[in-house]
Amino acid sequence: MNLHEYQAKAVLRAFDITTPRGVVVTEAAACAAAAVELGGDAWVIKAQVHAGGRGKAGGVKLCRSVDELAAAAQSLLGRRLVTYQNAPEGQPVTQVLIEETLPIARELYLSITVDRAAERIGLVASASGGMDIEAVAQATPEQILRESVNPVTGLMDYQARNIAFGLGLAGEQVAACVRLLKTCYRLFVEKDLALLEINPLVVTTEGRLVPLDCKMAVDDNALYRQKALAELNDLTQLDAKEAEAHAHQVNYIALNGNIGCMVNGAGLAMATMDLIQLSGGRPANFLDVGGGATAQSVAEAFRIILADANVQAVLINIFGGIVRCDLIADGIIQAVQEVGVTIPVIVRLEGTNAEAGRARLAASGLAIIAANDLNEAAQIAVNAALESAK
């Protein structure tokens, strides 16, 4: 689950990490009061969306008058901001963050994430922070600093100093960087984060280290114990179908293809999508109904898939381990009858009660195409989608 920048900075401040002073507004008329509250003669306005690349997309602007600030807010609020991370639809801007400006001497990069290969938390930093950090990582990877944290000892002082020295910091800045890194690591662990990215981490002309921007992603599996953070979830930032799936506790991610997928198990879902692609098709979504799928959850998943106007065929691939294939068949029949499906539905059932499930589908009298194996199912789905598109 992603947080907005202003929400992430509030978490930083709760851990005594200083951030620029800012005010969140939802209408341009509130900009004048925000400018008075912050003081100064220049402000930065930032669109609040769950995507990177805002600066290059016009979502971050420097304003030198209240009129300019209000005009910038008017141009951002109520529109969809499209960046390289959320193209082509973009995401809606319902609020903007107005912040004081700081005198910047340098821009650095810092992130903490889970290194799944090493099975540890990893720190990544660079002296070349800012909007082009991805290009830096590709063109000059030697400028990227890394430290892997032993979960038994936690982040050690010497590791934090290695980062500080690698960033070209000296004197009191080294001690300040060590404190910042250790606090960020503690925050990462205590709040069950999957990502904490500060870009840029600026060095002001006074020598202070200040997070100018911050992204936080919370591990969805830990939201049950991070209830305060879970309440910050902005479902307007999700695809409408993803938001509906979230409400029904279905794992769904919208894609740009034309073959809807319903599978139980993330690994099997990925394999199903790969086979669709290899067969010449394009998956329209990732959808995992989970190991404990019920007829009702399958019916809801079906409705979510069919809400995508691009879907021209649906491939259902169920392996019955914990879940029973006959119950899945009941859900499929229920959904097809209730929704009034007019596109081909291809079903492959294997595992617990698979024979009973196939028998129920056959006896339903509905236009459901049965497949004996996954390769056959993928090819039938691709061909059916091509026919539907004619």
Image (spheres, rainbow, N blue to C red):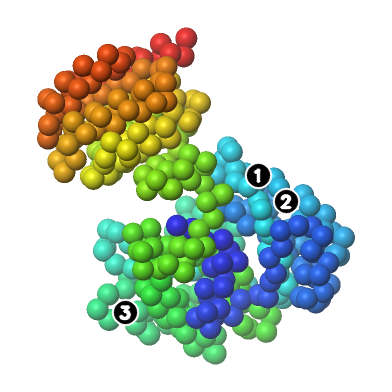
Q: Is residue 128 visible?
A: no
**Mark 3 surroundings within 10 Å by alpha-carbon count, few (fewer than 14), some (14 through 19), many (20 or more):** some
Residue type of the residue flagged with mark 3? Gly
The residue tagged 3 is: 154
Q: Is residue 122 above or below residue 365?
A: below
Comes first in the chain, label 3 or label 1: 1
Q: Kindly identify the residue that appears in the image at 30 percent across and 15 percent down.
A: 366
Tell me the amino acid under the disc marked 1. Arg
**Mark 2 to mark 3 CA distance (whole Å):** 42 Å
Residue 89 visible from this viewpoint: yes
- Gap in Å between the C-alphas at discs 2 and 1? 8 Å
Q: Is residue 120 left or right of residue 53?
A: left
Secondary structure category for the residue under label 3: loop
User: Residue at image x 60%, y 43%?
Assistant: 90
Residue 346: x and y, percent? Answer: 29, 21
125 or 89, which lies in front? Answer: 89
The residue indicated by pointer 1 is 80
Dot in front, 3 or 1: 1
Please state which of the two labelled residues, at mark 2 or mark 3, is closer to the viewer.
2
Determine contact: label 2, label 3, CB under 8 Å: no
Q: Does 313 sit left or right of 25 as displayed?
A: left
Mark 1 secondary-structure assignment: strand
The disc, 2 or 3, on the residue closer to the chain's N-terminal end is: 2
Quadrant in which the N terminus appears = bottom left
**On the image, numbered disc 2 is attached to which residue?**
76
**254 or 350, nearer to the observer:** 350
Q: Name the spot of residue 89 as percent of width and height, x first.
A: 59, 38
Residue 116 circle label: none
Indicate the position of residue 100 as horizontal and vertical percent values.
73, 72
Q: Residues within 10 Å of mark 2 (few under 14, many from 20)?
A: many
Residue 253 lies in quadrant: top left
Number of dots carrying numbers: 3
